[in-house]
Amino acid sequence: AQRVTQPEKLLSVFKGAPVELKCNYSYSGSPELFWYVQYSRQRLQLLLRHISRESIKGFTADLNKGETSFHLKKPFAQEEDSAMYYCALWSSGSARQLTFGSGTQLTVLP
Amino acid sequence: GAGVSQSPSNKVTEKGKDVELRCDPISGHTALYWYRQSLGQGLEFLIYFQGNSAPDKSGLPSDRFSAERTGGSVSTLTIQRTQQEDSAVYLCASSLVQPFQETQYFGPGTRLLVL
């Protein structure tokens, strides 16, 4: 069965510091991975997909199949980055499922 | 144009009653998704539609849950014989064509409370 692990429930960094939100997965097939974000009192948003290799709001995430990781990174955190971040894995095999991690609440301190 | 809308925005019901939640996707979007967000379970994916078809229903939590989509537009999520553990925010999203290959646009959610 597939699983997504976000080991940090809470993460605080200072404005201007680099930030990395960790995501590890277990899946026997070829993974498709996503990061979702939910700002306070706003709708959930899809932040980025590994397949498109986008950089959204300065965030990037690289799929590392060797380490089975898809960590989200930003070199200089901003206060407006404070939000809940969810990593998710899509399996397109016999059971088409999207599995979420438990989420990381990021707080960027002034 | 209008974004994804959901109704009702809030629903309070008694245990054992049936509820129906509605999602209006962005016009022209063929992919539609249902998620659930609760304190106990976090964020869960329930089901997606490609057009009117749901290729996989295994994400629905139990056989009390069902979803349908007609005319490639509006979708309803029905929960029969509601239980207290069904209390959650139910989110709907839509995207243009290919499920999970494009940006998803989320609705505001329906907050369901089962007493």
Image (spheres, coloured by chain):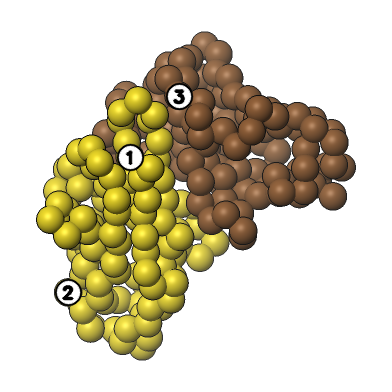
Chain at numbered mark 1: A
Quadrant occupied by the N terminus of chain B: top left
x and y percent of residue B28 in the render?
40, 21
Q: Residue at x 36, y 45 (%)?
A: A2
State which chain is coloured brown.
B
Figure check: B9 above or below B79: below
Instruction: Work out whether disc 1 and disc 2 sit on a shared chain.
Output: yes
Mark 2, residues whose alpha carbon is within 10 Å: few (<14), some, or many (≥20)?
Answer: few
Q: Residue at x 64, y 33 (%)?
A: B62
Amino acid type of the residue that numbered disc 3 sits on in the rendered structure: Asp
Q: Which residue is mark 1?
A: A90
B1 with respect to B111 (left or right): left
Q: Secondary structure at mark 1?
A: strand
Q: Earlier in the sequence, mark 1 or mark 2?
A: 2
Q: CA distance from mark 1 to mark 3?
A: 13 Å
Q: Secondary structure at mark 2?
A: loop
Q: Secondary structure at mark 3?
A: loop
Q: Residue at x 70, y 29 (%)?
A: B64
Q: Which residue is mark 2?
A: A75
State which chain is coloured yellow.
A
Q: Which residue is mark 3?
A: B56
Callout 1 touching callout 2 (CB < 8 Å): no
x and y percent of residue A69 in the render?
22, 58
Q: Nearer the viewer, residue A13 or B47?
A: B47
B34 with respect to B16 (left or right): left
